[in-house]
Amino acid sequence: MTQLDLEGTRTLLIQALNMALDIGNETTYSNSFDVTVAEGGFQFIPRVPAGYVLNGTLYQRIFEIANGSLYPYYTLLKQNGTYFVPLSGNSIHNARALFFPWLKGIPTRIEISDFEKFKANLEPGDIPFMQNLTINITDVTHLVIAGNSGSGKSYALTYLLEVLKKQAALHIVDPKMDAPTRWGNKNGVSVLTPDGDRSQNDFVNSVCDLLSSALHVVQARQAELKGDASLQFKSYVIVIDELLALTSSVSKSLKDTFFSLLSQVALLGRSTQVKLILLSQRFDANALPVVVREQANVMIQLGNVNRKTTQFLLPDLDNLDGIVIPSGKGTGLIQIIDGNHPANVMPLLMPTYREA
């Protein structure tokens, strides 16, 4: 596919907006607005006073027109609200613009034919999610994955475990004794699973013991950091699959204890590289405390994506209009808030690989 040059992109945007924006007779032909483009996105520059309101409705309308028109050459990054930028110059009439950041091309899935070779070529700590989208485990505070049954959560988790097994100390909790248990048995990693002779309360008590041990690691590492703030620790990762299955049938007091410990790990683990990877069909208040969800900086929604399924994990995403969501297993949305990537919600296609 030939990439559009910037001038060609500008011409296309102007034509599309003139034809579809529908703001009366306000067009570039009447000098009502202009469009400029750069490597990081484009600017819609209104000439003020204008016969249209500069608000979220206008911004969203431009986003929808531009995103469809630019596909597959660019992917616009969805904003939570209107994105204004100031412009230099002396004229009050064109001193501001609406900015629309983009990524070149469209999200592209990584296809792995040889997993061992793939891992051998990774930089230490790197977790590739798509082509041109990689995050380092040191930049992950906590990672959460939501998705309906059959959405590819277990497949995505197995990929993460495989990438992380030599980069982090993994501690896995698997209430359903499913894919994480099989992966742990195969790779010599301990997995905490229910015992048929014990109650669900006993099992969750064991999970609480694991979280308590993680807090001891946090405290020990905090003490070391007092003596040397430059210390770097190996990531200590607690993986919990299907949170709802874990807490759905335990006593309220035990559930409160579990939530309290989980919250403490979420709040205190950041500086000491103690992390959570949590999976659930949904992340409402029955699955985990709000404070834990708010500490996560990598959020993944797989499978059926709509306002109902994203309301807990991606609450700032008011609507999905204009986002081109890929179809197929292991697809959905991702948001990374680490200071190194755009913090916008973007489409996701998890890597595919052949399990040995």
Image (spheres, rainbow, N blue to C red):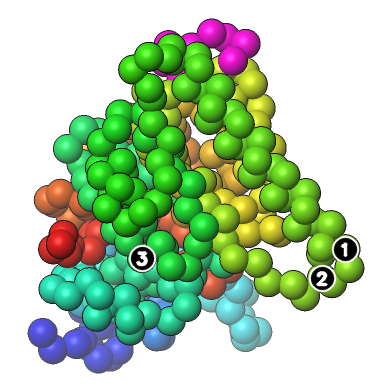
Is any part of residue 217 visible from this angle?
Answer: yes
Q: Is residue 333 left or right of residue 230?
A: left
For the magenta stretch, what is the residue range?
A: 247-254
Relative height, residue 124 to residue 4 (above, below): above
The residue carrying pointer 2 sits among few (fewer than 14), some (14 to 19) or many (20 or more) residues within 10 Å by Cα, namely few
The span from disc 1 to disc 2 (Cα, nearest Å) is 6 Å
* Label 3 with label 2: CB-CB less than 8 Å: no
Q: Which residue is mark 2?
A: 229
- Mark 3 neighbour class, 10 Å CA radius: few under 14, some 14 to 19, many 20 or more: many
Please tell me which residue is depicted at 66% across the width and 55% down the height of the picture: 270
Query: What's the residue at 89%, 68% (across, down)?
Result: 227
Measuring from the top left, give residue 223's x and y in whole percent. Answer: 84, 57
Secondary structure, mark 1, is helix
Q: Regarding mark 2 in the picture, which secondary structure is present there?
A: loop
Q: Is residue 353 left or right of residue 78?
A: left
Of 203 and 56, nearer the camera is 203
- How far, Cα to Cα, is label 1 from label 3? 31 Å
The disc labelled 3 sits on which kind of residue? Val
Q: Identify the element where label 3 is drawn.
A: helix
Q: On the rendered image, what quadrant is the N terminus found in?
A: bottom left
The quadrant holding residue 128 is bottom left
Residue 95: say if magenta: no
Disc 2 marks a residue whose amino acid type is Ala
Image location (x, y in percent) of residue 60: 36, 53
Question: Which residue was labeled with disc 3?
Answer: 163
Instruction: Return the x and y of residue 245 as percentages of the image width and height.
Output: 37, 23
User: Looking at the rendering, in which quadrant would you find the C terminus?
Assistant: bottom left
**Quadrant of res 212:** top right
Q: Which residue is mark 1?
A: 226
Residue placed farthest to the right in the image? 227
